[in-house]
Amino acid sequence: MRAAGPNAALGEAGFTWLSLKSGLGARRDNGLFSFLLVCIAVVAALTVTGLLILAVGKSPMAAYSALVRGVFGTTARFAFALNKSTPYILAGVGVALCFRAKLINIGAEGQIAVGGIAATWIGLNLEAAPSALIIAMALAAGAAGGAAWSALAAIIWLKRHVHEVLCTLLLNFVGVLLVSEALHGEMGEPGAGFPQSALLGRSAWLPRLLPGTDLHLGFLMAVLAVIGGYLLLWRTTFGFRLRLLGASRRAATYAGIAEPRCALAVMTLAGALAGLAGAIEVLGVHYRLIEGFSAGFGFNAVAVALIASINPIGVLPAGLFFGCLEAGALAMQRELGVPSSLVFVIQGLTMVLVLCVMGLSPRGRRV
Amino acid sequence: MEYVGFMDIAAAAVRIAIPLLFAALGALVSERAGTFAVGIEGMMLAGAFGGAIAVLMTTSLLIGLVVAAASGAVVGGTVGIATAKFRADQMVTGLAVNILVLGLTSFLLRALFGGRAPVIRLATLGTWPIPFLADLPILGPILFRQPGLVYVGLLLTALLSVFLAKTRTGLMLRAVGDGPEAAFAVGADPGMVRIAATVVGGALAGLGGAVLSLQEVGTFTDGMTNGRGFIALAAIIIGRWTPFGVLSGCLLFGAVTALELRAQAWGLPLSSYVIQMLPYIAALVLLAGIGRSARMPAAIGIPFVRH
Amino acid sequence: MLQMRGICKSYGSVRANWDVDFDVPGGRIVGLLGENGSGKTTLMKVLFGIIAPDAGTITINGRRIAPQSPRDAIAAGLGMIHQHFTLVDAMSVTENVMLGWDRAGYWLRPREIASLIARASQSYGLKVDPDAIVGDLPHGQRQRVEIIKTILRGAELLILDEPTSNLSPPEVAGLLDVMRRLREQGRGIVFISHKLDEVLEICDEIVVLRDGEVAGRRAASGASKSELARMMICREVATAIEKRQHDAGPAVLHVAKLSWRDEQGMERLRNISFSLHAGEILAIAGVDGNGQSELADVLAGLRRATEGGIELAGQDITDEPASKRLEAGLAYIPVDRATTSLVPAMSVADNLALRDFDQVPLARHGWLCAEAIAARAAQRIAEFDIRAAGPDAPASSLSGGNQQKIVIAREVGRRPKALIALQPTWGLDPGATRFVVEQLITMRDAGGAILYVSSSLEEVLMLADRIAVMYGGRLSKPIARDAADITEIGLMMAGAGGMSAAAGRSA
């Protein structure tokens, strides 16, 4: 009765729309329809950007092929692109689940920051423990930190009726400042020219998925999060409640759903995923806590969730889209001198176009 | 704390607050009419860029300001049309234009100048002491020996306050934000009013960006607004959605920044980062205290649908 | 002053207004009486420019007008006080009056306007504080703000649409006083209502609409209540449906002294008591807005009663949430399919599982059992003949009748002990209506108890074993269908029958 979504979507990565097709297509025409709209938006964005490239005297085809080669050219590059996509995918799943319940969570940046702090603390203080233990505990701490940060915003919203956007927004600032505070205090590395923590011991580094490349365990966790998010949303009673809450408050009451409890749970979950993403950035990419490491992830997670039609399965290609764009852009800049900031134009334009056509309402989307 | 040191900080606080003030006032106009102004960061950045380029090309401050306002207005209009006409979600649209403007300005910067914009120095952007008033004790150096755009900003606050409270258009704007059905019932078009408000808000934010690039920093760099747009949103919350409240919020942030730069020298027990956190925590506590965000425009975030 | 001639307006095959003539002389109050669907609201919408008529003319003071929008109507001297106010809660009374009003000038002169308000307030007995914030005012005072707004803009003819539905008795008396003063000043007033007592008290003339046509005109002084009631609802008495005659079983649902107050403190349900027996259909008649949907919501568990108790098969369910009541055997068909009883964006199968998706066998340990959901969907679709592309089709793709079949299949399919049905045939074509009726009869014959709430008297007469009438939040004593007198029911629906004594009006 239900289609084999996750299996079809797994195993294909990067710019392969086929995975998105079989994943979403199984969700009836509505899913296919949304997916097509997103594709059209992306193509339109790429076209406009292509015009911009022309305007500065470079060839769009050359630029885009440099972009693609920057991602797929070598295994190392591909691994880098996947790594870059990981935090987008993780945080994106959380944000997508919140959106399903009509909750706007823009606090991912703060949650990632706090998650990173927690993970670094564990990593620095448990040096002597076996590698698997450090990593497991650091990741768990990251998730817990992010979860707590998000729950804090949710509780202020629920108990004091302050709009959830304001809470998550303000806590973003505080979370990011906490990183700076930590790095200028106990966790900072004295003598370093840049606010950063001491390098984590080798045993705390995330293991590699593919030996010889940089691809770290975090990507696998991101994929698991996508599958988990999908199963949660479509196969569990909790997911049913989320969908119902987002579709109709009155119907949710009629069906006996306790809205505050549900909202708190999903916000905490999203925070945990974002915190996990922060921990992964620390343990797998930088191997230390760096000031500003969380910059931009929060809002991009919102963009990713939106482009994914707020469907967890769609977050995988959407997150890869964002991550690969950013990875490939650096190559594009190096080879052709086309500024890498162009990817922001592509991302922003895609978002605006998708929003105008679809917004966040279930017009034509399966709930 | 020495007398001179205090004066120094106060004057710096006012000066630093001004770009923030323009952006916050712009965001206020947008929000009082019912549209979340999450995109104000992008509008400010667009203005910073537009203003800098215009001044570089024409060496005229006036043209620079006009272009800055226009750039911000265009971005504002985009948000307005997307949210009022296409009913796109306001928050996410704001975030989208932020990303878009960041990329676009960054790209154009490189395209036009190969990466670095030359430094802009304009004589008119030096301080303009107001005769007589500048010699007042205490207030003189703080308020009346500032660069010209500071005075414009303070004047704007007063003007906006009067506009909102005492004019017919201001009343209608507030009605669209608090109760669009009532506005519709008396013959207004809430959608158009909201679009107009985001355009005006964008223009003001664009001016704020121009103040930043032309007066504060003297050049344009990638993403130079650096989150000031979001700080402006926090200032609106602290200021409870009134122009003078917003002014106090911006002054607070200005003071925090000015203080933070000098905190080291005084060996304060609080780390500078904790000082920077205080306004946000204060805003949260304030909001939690008032409970149901008492002063936030009642219909904000809800697209108006004709029946 | 006002002359409407030959007004016709149809929506497809439904005749909302048919050849209606309606006059309002200056300095008179004309009552427009009729039950739901009689065409009163349509007529006024035509007058006020909200909808355009298919035929007919409107003349004001000798001048023909054809208003395209409320603005035109206001310019012609009309003013309308709707049931749902259009005021900005966050603003003061003065600001609300100034909004969009040219006279207020570009630079607002609140002091001047405030004194205008104070003066109007004095002369019409509309006590309002110009500086008060509208959101803090009770319903009655907000209505006064609306009236002042209208008068200050120069309205010569006022239209009041069911103005007393949310007013307390003293507020009603106050309103009637205001209307008298306005009349003395030479203004014309249209008083739309379904409440006979009020209409007879205040109006000079009464026009009764029924099924879109004028059923009769009377001067108020000579009119009799029963005559008016008969004009309102007279129709061939619908033959009762063939039902198996049997004695009602034991009481399944017992409601004692149920009361409910809304957020503004208005009592919407007053001291309601009745029993529902197995194997019977107890139908509650009444014009919309007298507390029916509130009663249904309170019984079903979507709202909590402020006083009183509900017992289901001996079990006290007064404080139980909706889902627990369902488990105990109380099913509910709400009236609005789009927002409450159905989620249009979700699939048919999901909608069928809406109320017990988290219980065995549809779910175990938090995981949904897809096979069980599918099995139930298949079974219900077959049993109730739900025409859909498949169990996974979104509910929005089904016709209104089939959507209602989903709701019925869900609620009735569990073989509940008692079912509350609120306007279950609303918006359905005759075929779908017949289906719903058949299902309910089947359930009744099998021993189920049904509380059928409807504003359509025809349906009530057709289905009921016993009938009760709701008016002003109170419920009349149920009487057997065979013993029911149509006129008496009509009077009760208009508040003038045996219930008015119980209504305890102070007027």
Image (cartoon, coloured by chain):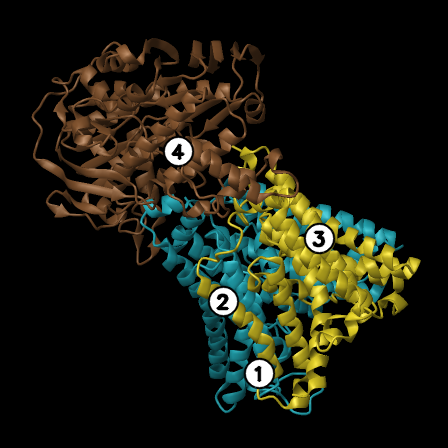
- Residue under label 3: B202
- Residue under label 4: C125
Q: In the image, residue C418 lies at what x, y percent?
A: 19, 37
- Whether residue A14 appears in this view of the structure is no
The residue carrying pointer 2 sits among few (fewer than 14), some (14 to 19) or many (20 or more) residues within 10 Å by Cα, namely some
Tag in front: 4 or 1: 4
C354 vs C174, nearest the viewer: C174
Q: Which chain is brown?
A: C
- The colour with which the image depicts chain A is cyan
Q: In the image, residue B282 lies at what x, y percent?
A: 53, 71
Q: In the image, residue C391 lies at what x, y percent?
A: 39, 37
Chain letter of the residue beneath label 1 in the structure image: A
SS for callout 4: loop
- Whether residue C126 appears in this view of the structure is yes
- Residue under label 1: A182
SS for callout 1: helix
Q: Are marks 4 and 1 in contact (CB under 8 Å)?
A: no
- Which three-letter amino acid code belongs to the residue tagged 4? Gly
Q: Quadrant of the N terminus of chain B?
A: bottom right
- Residue under label 2: B286
- The colour with which the image depicts chain B is yellow
Horizontal relation, residue C172 to residue A2: left or right: left
The residue carrying pointer 4 sits among few (fewer than 14), some (14 to 19) or many (20 or more) residues within 10 Å by Cα, namely some
Q: Going 62% across and 61% down the picture, which residue do you hit?
A: B244
Chain letter of the residue beneath label 3 in the structure image: B
The span from disc 1 to disc 2 (Cα, nearest Å) is 26 Å
Q: Earlier in the sequence, mark 2 or mark 3?
A: 3
